[in-house]
Amino acid sequence: MEPTPVVRETLAALRPGRAWGEVRLVDEVGSTNLEVRGLPVWSAVVARRQSAGRGRRGRAWSDTEGHGIACSLLAEVDVDGQGDGALGWVPLGTGLAVRDCLASLGLDAALKWPNDVLAGPAEQKVCGILCEALPPSSKGEPPRVVVGVGVNLDHEAPDLPVPTATSLRLLARAAGRPAPTRDEVVPALLDALRDRLDPLDLTSLRRDYGEACATLGREVDVHLPDGSVQRARAEGVDDDGRLRVAGPQGSATVSAGDVHHLRHQPPS
């Protein structure tokens, strides 16, 4: 099928030298993560709105019509020789990629473990990420991962789902910059994702994540899957991407759960 003019423009804006699968740009879809699964690797589905988007741990992803970008990329991740925990770095690398994308647009952001993208002095969330590993299609093939990213693009403050969120439009206004357009953000995001995931370079990911993560060095509340809450100090990220914390009960690693930064506690 011949690409539409808007798809051709997006493909032309991508950095040359890479083979892409199919790129679909649509107004609305149920879930970009579901839509991209049947496409060739390095395909992307990008929508202005999702009607059935999902966040981490099965949460619904709230979306305001026309104001956001929902993007899912079907990545093939070569983890050969990088250890059993290499695949766990894909969500963290995705957060770094979004931060890279925003930096290319002149906007600053930081990360909250594992992959929330925060911006502004109030550390408001500008992006949500959901990565889902797929069953292997055949023995010996590199793992395939659906990398889902939801970006708040054009929201004004009343349009945002929660007070702790922000948008690229609001961030650009605060920085005295023009608001980035959808046509600017989409190719920058796709290129940034490929930069971080193809190939998966754990050495650079570990180094850059440590520098970008605002969680490290501060007091946090860790909300664990069993419903308990542990207050601790975030000390680092281990080789498998798990958060190292130290609290009254000693040191531990956290592989799953929500981390809440305590207010008025800047990282040391």
Image: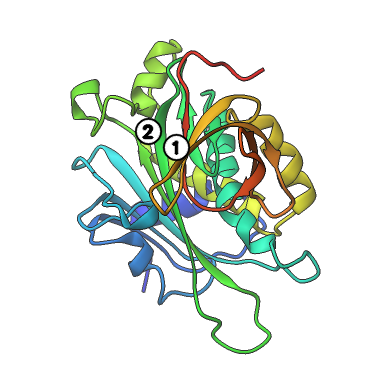
**Dot 1 lies on which element?**
helix
- The amino acid sitting under disc 2 is Thr
Q: Which mark is residue 218?
A: none
Q: Which sits in the foreground, 261 or 15?
A: 261
The residue labelled by disc 2 is 181
Percent x, y of residue 149: 42, 49
Asked if residue 178 shows in the view, the reply is no
The label shown at residue 184 is: 1
Q: Can you tell which quarter of the image residue 229 is in?
A: top left
Q: Nearer the viewer, residue 42 or 95?
A: 95
Q: In the image, is 218 to the left or to the right of 126?
A: right
x, y (%) of residue 7?
A: 39, 56
| Residue 57 in the image: above or below residue 234 | below
Asked if marks 1 and 2 touch (Cβ < 8 Å), the reply is yes
> Between 54 and 175, which is closer to the camera in this rendering?
54
At x 23%, y 62%, the residue is: 30
Secondary structure type for disc 2: loop
Determine the residue positioned at 55% across, 49% down.
Answer: 94
Residue 127 appears in the figure: yes
- What percent of the width, then of the height, locates residue 182? 37, 39
Residue pictured at 40% horizontal, 33% vertical: 126
**Label 1 neighbour load within 10 Å: few <14, some 14-19, many 20+:** few
